Amino acid sequence: MSESPDRTPLPRSFFDRPVLEVAPDLLGRTLVRTTDEGRIELRLTEVEAYAGAIDPGSHAFRGRTARNAVMFGPPGHAYVYFTYGMWHCLNLVCGPEGEASGVLLRAGEIRHGADLARPRRRSARKDAELAKGPARLATALDVPGSLNGTDVCAGPDAPLAVLTGTPPAPSLIRTGPRTGVGGDGAPHPWRFWIAEDPTVSPYRPHTPRKRRLDPARADA
């Protein structure tokens, strides 16, 4: 029996395109996380594009490091990073190998396996909040740093996979500045989301960190 069209895994060629094509095309796709505990399926509702060497907001803007090496390809792999000393975030690598770019998965609707996600997200007041934000998404799906570099095109039973799903009508796709990105990367309208979806996270502009004033060096 053949798979339902919306259950078909996305091929590597889907990710082997410019990041600004891949990012909005990921909306409505089904992200699958499989663990020993079971399977969680999430419909992607919000993403952000990061374009490597031409994007000051990207981890890869200043070149390859041990941390960002996965971003340089091949496409169709997970880039998982640790942030604020507490949380992991999940990205999907795209574009030609050697040209670092990726899509941050910011939010989604858990359509299967919410019973597995709820204990990991006890502060969520309702299921729409389980994966409402990139760190919440990674926490709800139990995405540790060890999944960095995972091939998401390896098949539906891999630890991470992306299925065709049901993309929204183009009229429902919105775009705007990326959350929390400052500097020269701030104006880029590279955040994409599904309009009026309750799982989409609120936009927050970049807020510069205030430097602590050293009393010994303060002007009198």
Image (cartoon, rainbow, N blue to C red):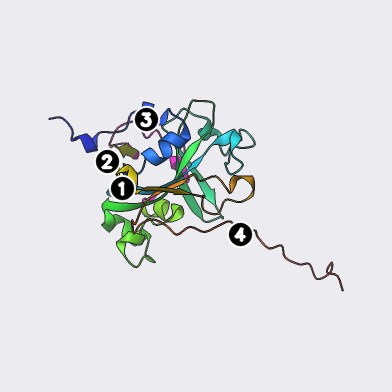
Viewer-nearest of labels 4 and 1? 4
Q: Which residue is mark 3?
A: 14
Q: Are marks 1 and 2 in contact (CB under 8 Å)?
A: yes
Q: Nearer the viewer, residue 143 or 11?
A: 11
Please, what is the three-letter code of the amino acid marked with disc 4? Thr
**Residue ID for mark 4:** 207
State the image quarter where residue 121 is shown: bottom left
Where's residue 119, x and y in %?
A: 33, 61
Badge 2: residue crowd in 10 Å (few <14, some 14–19, many ≥20)? many
State which tag comes first along the sequence, 4 or 1: 1
Of helix, strand and loop, which one carries label 1? strand
Residue drawn 23% across and 38% down? 6
Comes first in the chain, label 2 or label 3: 3
Q: Amino acid at mark 3?
A: Phe
Residue 44 position in % (x across, y down): 35, 47
Which numbered circle lies on residue 165? 2
Is 211 inside the magenta-drawn segment? no
Expressed as whole percent of the image width and height from the top left, the position of residue 69 reads 55, 33
Cα separation between marks 2 and 4 = 35 Å
Q: Which residue is mark 1?
A: 43
* Magenta residues (range): 141-160
Q: CA distance from mark 3 to mark 4?
A: 35 Å
How far, Cα to Cα, is label 1 from label 3? 17 Å
